[in-house]
Image (spheres, rainbow, N blue to C red):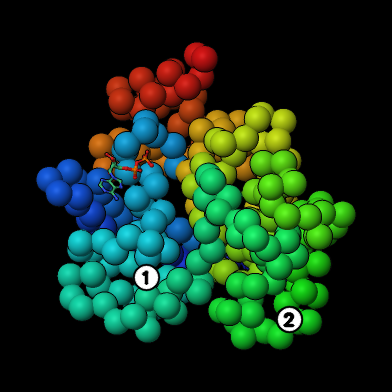
Amino acid sequence: MTDPQPKAGETILRLNDIRKVYGDHVALGGVSLDVKRGEVVAIIGPSGSGKSTLLRCVNQLEVPDSGTLEVLGSNIDFAGRVSSADLLALRRKVGMVFQSFNLFPHMNVLRNVSFPQERVLGRSREEADKVSRDLLERVGLASKMENFPQKCSGGQQQRVAIARALALEPQIMLFDEPTSALDPELGLEVLAVMRRLADQGMTMVVVTHEIHFAAEVADRLIVMADGAIIEEGVPSELLAAPKTARAKQFLSAITDR
Ligand code: ADP
């Protein structure tokens, strides 16, 4: 995976009053969030609370209606006109892993990881394959490089997706419920890879229902409801004593299962 980054404490991602409305539904009602280099932030909350929209606004799969986004010093104000060059530059700094893997079905595992490097970074096939092999080894998939995605388990496919995102050398990794489509055991393989990545100092924002992962790996836990951050804090403290009735209700619903 990438070289360890120091936990320098510098803010590298800043969302300020980000608002996203679909028709008359307010998906994000002005969300602000700062993430420091090397920090792991877990986001939990009921379905429909805006967690996925928040991640999608960070990597520009959705363009917010207003607010500002600062990534590694580059600032975008969505109230004004946003240039496609700015969006592209921003996207290159942020990697994303989805619930549904989204691998290319007609490419083998190696090509899945190499192809975007050739397209986005202009690497030669040889260079890209070298990076891909190294990353696939690190996520435990050295023996699967020639396989097509449909011949891989869900956990393996998700690890390919993580390798593919890392190959583009992002400074921040976003994970949108990366294990929720997986059987528990296969989810563990993916969580182990994510845990290693966190240990190596990658800055990560993880939307998840995996409360143990959030408690053990995240530096900060955020609870969202109705398009807003309703609570945040050190995971162990927040989980032991949520302050708001809404967070309490959500946490008891997931922990009482
Ligand atoms: P979560 O990830 O917390 O489950 P989402 O961010 O996916 O929530 O969705 C927040 C709200 O925005 C939901 O009510 C959802 O139906 C709505 N929404 C999300 N994406 C779209 C879209 N492309 N068009 C219309 N409504 C959307």
Q: Position of residue 49 (x, y in %)?
A: 31, 38
Find the distance from the CA under tag 1 to the CA under tag 2.
Answer: 33 Å
> Is label 1 within 8 A of ligand 1 (CB to nearest ligand atom)?
no
In-image side of 224 versus 101 (left or right) = left
Task: Tell which circle, 1 or 2, labels the residue nearer the N-terminal end.
Answer: 1
Does residue 95 appear in this view? yes
Picture quarter containing residue 16?
A: bottom left
Q: For this rendering, which residue is in front, 183 or 108?
A: 108
Q: Residue at x 58, y 50 (%)?
A: 101
- Considering the numbered disc 1 on the image, is that residue within a helix, a strand or a loop? strand
Which three-letter amino acid code belongs to the residue tagged 1?
Glu
Q: How many marks?
A: 2
Marking on residue 3:
none
Task: Find the residue positioned furthest to the right.
Answer: 143
- Location of mark 1 (residue): 70
Image coordinates of residue 54 in percent, x first then y, are 36, 52
Q: Residue furthest left?
A: 24
Furthest toward the front, the residue is: 106
Q: Residues within 10 Å of mark 1 (few under 14, many from 20)?
A: some
- The residue that label 2 is drawn on is 125
Specify whether 64 is left or right of 190: left
Q: Nearer the viewer, residue 116 or 184?
A: 116
Name the residue rendered at 85%, 57% in the picture. 142
Of residues 149 and 5, the one nearer the viewer is: 149
What amino acid type is highlighted by mark number 2? Arg
Q: Residues within 10 Å of mark 2 (few under 14, many from 20)?
A: some
Position of residue 146 relative to residue 231, above or below, is below
Where residue 187 appears, as percent x and y from the top left, is 66, 36
> In the structure shown, which secondary structural element does the residue marked by tag 2 occupy?
helix
